[in-house]
Image: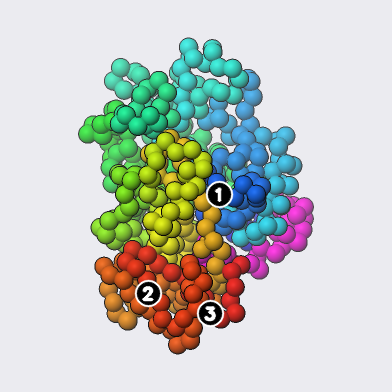
Amino acid sequence: MLKAMTVQSVMLLLIFGSIYASIADTQKHYPSIFQAWSGIENRPDIDELHRLAQHDLAFAHPYTLLRIAWDISEEQPYAGLATALNPSQLNTARQRKQELLSLNPNLLLLVEIRCRDARYVSRQNEANVENWWEVGYFPPDSAYWLRDSNGKPVIGWGEDTNGDGKIDEDDEVLGYLIDFTNPEMQNLMVKQAVALDTSGLFDGIMIDWWNEDYATSPVTVDDWSETILTREAELEARLAILRKIREQVADDFLILVNANMRQIPKSAPHVNGLFMECYKSEHAKGYNLDQILQIEKTLLWAEQHLREPRINCLEGWRVVTDYMADLNTRVAERNSTENRQWMRMFTTLSLTHSDGYVLLGDDNAIPAPDHLHNWYDFYDADLGQPIQDRAVQYRAITGLFIRQFEKGWAVYNRSGAARTVTFDKPVTAVSNSKRYSSHEIPDFDGEIFLKNDNNSR
């Protein structure tokens, strides 16, 4: 069990009995798939609880995960100021976690804590909201909002929902910048992390927009040439946040940060994993070799340098053909020959270069909720546990990697050409169910091979 055996966790163990007791005896699946905020769209015959439980790690708002929200009220409706979970929903959350762990004892649940940006609602617009809980993350006049030279809150994030190439302030803005250099705001984050830890419901937190290389506070959302905060000020604040949280939570409380494809050496002693949200600027194209090499380099670094237990999460973005696609079109596009190849490549890259988690999700550019994804049959392969070191080259061929597991092998190819791998006995390729001793793998692709009598989980 990842959680330290505090008094509260002992109480929960008594509540949940054999389900919690069984966790210590289980090991996560390989491949291990994670959920970043949004879930599976191509399995309508499976209910939401079972779709969530197919993943081995998920991060989102606590209500998305366990049907428990932060403790807000009509008198105090601002989620950013809440430092406790809603007590009236605790029993529901405990029951839901029990059900999830009965389906997947390996599932780790992490809650996103807002740090860099959040929903802002002006005082004028607050008066017009239909429901009291539809206000902003902080009060509109709060000192926790980062403001420009005119004292105006600054747009931090938006999405081009109509495809015109710019963020319209009226309806495409999703978040305004938070002043996370403010020590009081940092202390709120710490209190939220402590509340999650002591609840016994969650395994850790996820913090978005983690960056040691440059500032993330642009004066305008469309132009990052000038920032309100300096890189040095932001980095100092980020490290302070990590230190404060680590001082207050259990040693094995998990911290996952979104650093994209960047290394974060100064944060490494406090962080258990990178959420590698692998950005690409052109939604209609895949990744190039330089990007893939950077992904490999960062993933290997994270596997070697971050705090244990490590929970690195690698996400590739699919190729998007129809920018304004509806659900059925999104599901079909994810299942295209091209996207299935990217899915296999990212899955086997993760398997050969890490002991972590992987996902092929939607590109952030499209107007649908970010990170929606298909569940692929390829994910159902059961490799057992790894028994070979990471990133081993097959027969010294540069860019062709193989890793052995208890029940088979993962092979990943970015060598610049199609390659043939040969085994002593016939093995089954998961992608096409072909059983031979030799198999050809295209460039920028990968395959899982199962030994005889090893079936999918």
Residue 13 visible? The answer is: yes
The disc placed on residue 42 is 1
Residue 14 magenta-drawn? yes
**What kind of residue is marked 1?**
Asn
Specify which label sits upstream in the sequence, 3 or 1. 1
Q: Is residue 319 left or right of residue 120?
A: left
**What kind of residue is marked 2?**
Glu
The disc placed on residue 178 is none
* Picture quadrant where residue 442 is located: bottom left
Specify which label sits upstream in the sequence, 2 or 1. 1
Residue in view at x 60 percent, y 56 percent: 54
Which element carries disc 2, helix, strand or loop? strand
Image quadrant containing the N terminus: bottom right
Residue 343 appears at what percent x and percent y?
43, 58
Which element carries disc 3, helix, strand or loop? loop
Q: Is residue 343 left or right of residue 452?
A: left
Task: Tell me how many marks there are.
Answer: 3
Labels 3 and 1 touching (C-beta < 8 A)? no
Task: List the residue tagged with mark 2.
Answer: 440
- Report the predominant secondary structure element of the magenta stretch: helix
Task: List the residue tagged with mark 3.
Answer: 451
